[in-house]
Amino acid sequence: MVNFNGNLISSTDALFTSKNRGYKYGDVLFETLKVINGKIFFWEDHYFRLMASMRIMRMDIPMNFTMEFLESEILKTIKANDLLGATARVRLNVDRGEGGKYLPSETSKVAFNIIAEALGEPFYTIKDNQTYEVDLYKDFFIAPGLLSGLKNNNKAIQVMGSIYAKENDLDNCLVLNTDKSVIEALNGNLFLVKGDKIKTPPLEDGCLKGVMRKQILEILSKDVNLYVEESSISPFELQKADELFITNVIKGIVPITKYRKKTYGCEFAKELTNRLNTKIRLGS
């Protein structure tokens, strides 16, 4: 079952017409959520990111779009799919409805839909001896700026980069901005470990304002033995790193084990995953 503006309908029914602005122009934002036993991980961070993104996109935020209302609609969708006592992946889409060309019509109204599906592990894990190989995707680049950090449906680089990764037997690719700095992976933020120094690209470089990125930075900020900075990462630095890892809400922390001829360990990533799970259990 799919939630369309508060109404539960079959997933085989049409959600919208060909006039939908999200379909026609990518005039849509989304949040990908992890839900366990009816608890939405980091819901407050997701909600406020969505509201901030809607303001940037000049969308009129409906009066009923409160954190409590959207949470109840998400849980209603999960329950309708018999996932209330399980682990679920949820996608919350918010579009500007129908009408207009590039300029929205005065009758265009913000709409939402929610899709839920079963997910595997409840908490985050890193399996022993898992391999994860990446390379740079250099066919196209992301421009630094506010729009690049939004979670919207304009994901051409991610789609083409994923095709490139499959064709080259890679697990993922790292994306560059127009200044040729490494800013993120195709599906998550990037962190670099070198000794006691941890780096992640700043939002100004064009990376996604990731919810998991925020959680990791909060955890790291409490460790007085680490030096954490948000600064640009050059391709040259990748081969000098002790560890590289990718973060997103669904997978948590994904250690990179190989980049070109360089191989990496994952001891710090495993330790950090334990801290992340502790943070979740404590609800902090």
Image (cartoon, rainbow, N blue to C red):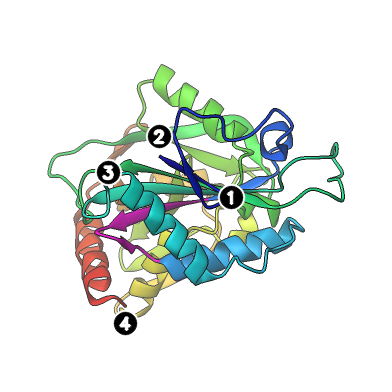
The amino acid sitting under disc 3 is Leu
Inter-mark Cα distance, 3 to 4: 35 Å
Q: Earlier in the sequence, mark 3 or mark 4?
A: 3
On the image, numbered disc 3 is attached to which residue? 119
Query: Which callout, 4 or 1, points to the residue nearer the camera?
Result: 1
Indicate the secondary structure of the residue bearing disc 4: loop
Q: Describe residue 208's horizontal placement relative to residue 117 as left or right.
A: right
Residue at the disc numbered 4: 224
Report the magenta residues as a range: 31-42
Marks 2 and 3, how far apart at CA: 20 Å
Q: How many marks?
A: 4
State the image coordinates of residue 127 (x, y, percent, origin top left).
Answer: 15, 45
Q: Is residue 154 magenta?
A: no
Q: Residue furthest left?
A: 128
Q: Nearer the viewer, mark 3 or mark 4?
A: 3
- Above or below, comparing residue 199 to residue 237 in the picture: below
Residue at the spot of label 2: 172
The kind of residue tagged 1 is: Phe
Q: Marks 3 and 1, how far apart in space?
A: 22 Å
Q: Position of residue 254 (x, y in %)?
A: 30, 47
